[in-house]
């Protein structure tokens, strides 16, 4: 196995990871950042972002992430393609294995591995994954131009995905299990005012239907126990996310939902020298701007920690 030693290792490449890299590189920590499975993170699967400060006309998630990466690289961050496959935080320096073969010794680690989309857990949903079932409207929406699709969920993500799909598709059904949308008022108004979005309140998905060509419908049941089938070619999940923390289980303290627990007001985990930033430690806000802010905090906490190491 190849070996390497670094001062500051950043795992993950969403707004948290890149912001940490910008701050750490400007502080001369020579950070090495591994981008992970989804370079740029979840924002690369969203559409137009209109609430990231400094972009009055909005910006695409992909562009925002490319800009953050460019800024990190400009100040000297070493951004690499690769996935952390094992970590050992039991002794210092910490040890992180990349792609199962490259071993890195790190004086400090910033975990910014984000979160991943949830699925309903139906067999039919798994069966038609990639054949009409998707958790990313911006990645796959164009496949359903002029067709009917369904989006499951009633949060901001579901509303955003439904709005995006409404611009491409003939009709969008939103399948919402409660009798209200959990999304922000602005997003609620947006979907309720879009003529080709129909919100099916009080409905649950029983089965995704299809044939060898892929999805062709969804079997729903309503609160009164009445079943009905809607004819759709695409079925999009937007029911939330789970944190990408499997790798750290048993080493970092996680909450009940699996999010990394940080010391309030800081990016510090239960292990001195290991910090967490972004959605991986934030079950509440989960915004690009809050993730970026926590990436900044992680880099500053890390810088202070490395200074204390130097003083020992
Ligand atoms: P949320 O947790 O806010 O919403 C999930 C939705 O999926 C809820 O309507 C929930 O229903 C529904 N749901 C969950 N499980 C199931 C299930 N098994 N079957 C059917 N429906 C289910 O997740 P989001 O991803 O929408 O948002 C996460 C966070 O990110 C939020 O804080 C949101 O505000 C934020 N966000 C902000 C954006 C922006 O500002 N531009 C864009 C996207 C997200 P129920 O309500 O019944 O629990």
Image (cartoon, helix red, strand yellow):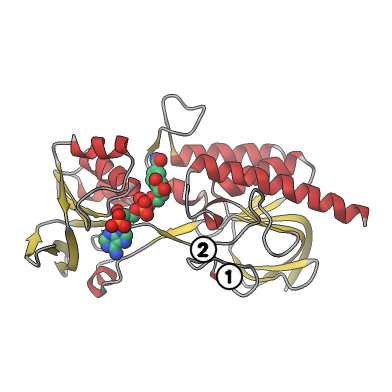
The residue closer to the viewer here, 130 or 237, is 237
Q: Quadrant of residue 232?
A: bottom left
Residue at (24, 67) in percent of width and height: 128
Answer few, some or many: residues within 10 Å of disc 2's Cα (few below 14, many 20 plus, some between 14 and 19): some
Q: Residue furthest right?
A: 312
x and y percentages locating residue 135 in the rendered image: 33, 57
Which residue matches tag 2? Answer: 244
Answer few, some or many: residues within 10 Å of disc 1's Cα (few below 14, many 20 plus, some between 14 and 19): some
Residue 154: give its label: none
Residue at (60, 61) in percent of width and height: 261
Q: CA distance from mark 2 to mark 1?
A: 8 Å
* On-image quarter of the N terminus: bottom right
The residue closer to the viewer here, 106 or 52, is 52
x and y percentages locating residue 154 in the rendered image: 27, 51
x and y percentages locating residue 296 in the rendered image: 65, 43
| Element on which disc 2 rests | loop
| Element on which disc 1 rests | helix
* In this rendering, position of residue 87 left or right of residue 304: left
Which residue matches tag 1? Answer: 247
Q: Is residue 160 visible?
A: yes
Q: Is residue 160 above or below residue 11?
A: above
> CB under 8 Å between callouts 2 and 1?
yes
Q: Quadrant of residue 152?
A: bottom left
Ligand 1 within 8 A of label 1's CB?
no
Q: Residue furthest top?
A: 56
Q: Is residue 219 above or below residue 14?
A: below
Looking at the rendered structure, the number of numbered marks drawn on it comes to: 2
Residue at (55, 46) in percent of width and height: 291
x and y percentages locating residue 299 in the rendered image: 70, 47
Residue at (59, 55) in percent of width and height: 112
The residue closer to the viewer here, 194 or 210, is 194
């Amino acid at each position: 196995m190849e070996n390497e030693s670094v001062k500051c290792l950043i795992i993950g490449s969403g707004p948290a990871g890149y912001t940490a890299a910008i701050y750490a590189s400007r502080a001369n920590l020579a950070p090495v950042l591994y981008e992970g499975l989804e370079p740029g993170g979840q924002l690369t699967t969203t559409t137009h972002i209109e609430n990231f400060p400094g972009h009055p006309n909005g910006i695409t998630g992909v562009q925002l992430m490319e800009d953050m990466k460019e800024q990190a690289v400009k100040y000297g961050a070493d951004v690499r393609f690769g996935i952390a496959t094992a970590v050992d935080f039991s002794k210092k320096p910490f040890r992180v294995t990349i792609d199962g073969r490259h071993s890195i010794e790190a004086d400090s680690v910033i975990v910014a591995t984000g979160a991943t989309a949830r699925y309903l857990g139906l067999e039919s949903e798994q069966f038609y994954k990639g054949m009409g079932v998707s958790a990313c409207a911006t990645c796959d929406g164009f496949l359903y131009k002029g067709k009917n699709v369904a989006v499951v969920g009633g949060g901001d993500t579901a509303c955003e995905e439904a709005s995006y799909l409404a611009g491409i598709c003939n009709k969008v059904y939103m399948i919402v299990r409660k009798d209200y949308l959990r999304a922000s008022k602005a997003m609620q108004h947006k979907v309720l005012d879009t003529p080709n979005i129909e919100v099916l309140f009080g409905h649950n998905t029983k089965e995704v239907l299809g044939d060898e060509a892929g999805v062709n419908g969804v079997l729903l049941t309503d609160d009164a126990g009445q079943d009905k089938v809607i004819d759709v070619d695409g079925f999009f999940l937007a029911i939330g996310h789970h944190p990408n923390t499997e790798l750290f289980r048993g080493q970092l303290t996680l909450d009940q939902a699996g999010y990394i627990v940080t010391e309030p007001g800081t990016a510090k985990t239960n292990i001195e020298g290991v910090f967490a930033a972004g959605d991986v430690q934030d079950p509440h806000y989960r915004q690009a701007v809050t993730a970026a802010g926590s990436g900044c905090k992680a880099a500053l906490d890390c810088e202070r920690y490395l200074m204390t190491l130097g003083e020992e």
